[in-house]
Amino acid sequence: MPHVIIKALPGKTAAQKQQIADAITRSVSEIFGNEPDAISVALEDVSAERWKDDVYVPDIVGRADTLLKPPGYQL
């Protein structure tokens, strides 16, 4: 039962959010073999001002051992 959390800067439309959720659901279903109904996807808006403290430090730097695709930037 995979659960995927996306953290992104605000400003994405509802259509964009649904499109990424659908794409992730399809990919996870195809690659992991889960039924689409077993997959959940969440999107959390994080402001640019809070990105370093709320995402970069705890999730990227602090959990570097879990990153499958690190960012191409440093803060």
Image (tube, rainbow, N blue to C red):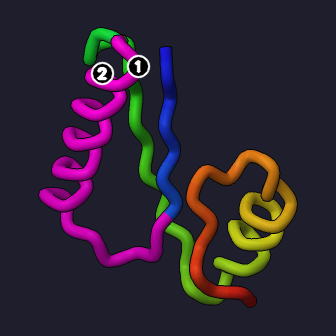
Tell me which amino acid carries mark 1: Phe
Label 2 SS: helix
Residue in the foreground of this view, choosing between 4 and 48: 4
> Residue, x 35% and y 29% (percent of image)?
28
Disc 2 crowd, CA 10 A, few/some/many (<14, 14-19, 20+): some
Are discs 1 and 2 less than 8 Å apart at CB?
yes
Dominant secondary-structure state across the stretch colored magenta: helix
At x 82%, y 67%, the residue is 61
Judge from the rendering whether residue 26 lies leftward or rightward of residue 7; answer left or right: left
Vertical comparison of 74 with 46: above or below: below
Q: CA distance from mark 1 to mark 2?
A: 6 Å
Against 18, residue 74 (above or below) is below
Looking at the picture, tell me which residue is in the foreground, 56 or 71. 71
Q: Is residue 9 left or right of residue 64?
A: left
Residue 22 drawn above or below residue 62: above
Instruction: Indicate the position of residue 46 as horizontal and vertical percent values.
Output: 55, 71
Quadrant position of residue 34: top left
Range shown magenta: 8-33
Horizontal and vertical percent position of residue 9: 46, 75
Q: Quadrant of residue 12?
A: bottom left
Q: Where 47 falls versus 58 (above or below)?
A: below
Q: Secondary structure at mark 1?
A: helix
- The residue lying at 19 percent from left, 58 percent from top is 14
Residue placed most toward the observer, 67 or 16: 67
In which image quadrant can residue 48 be found?
Answer: bottom right
Q: Which residue is mark 1?
A: 32
Q: Residue 29 — which label? A: 2
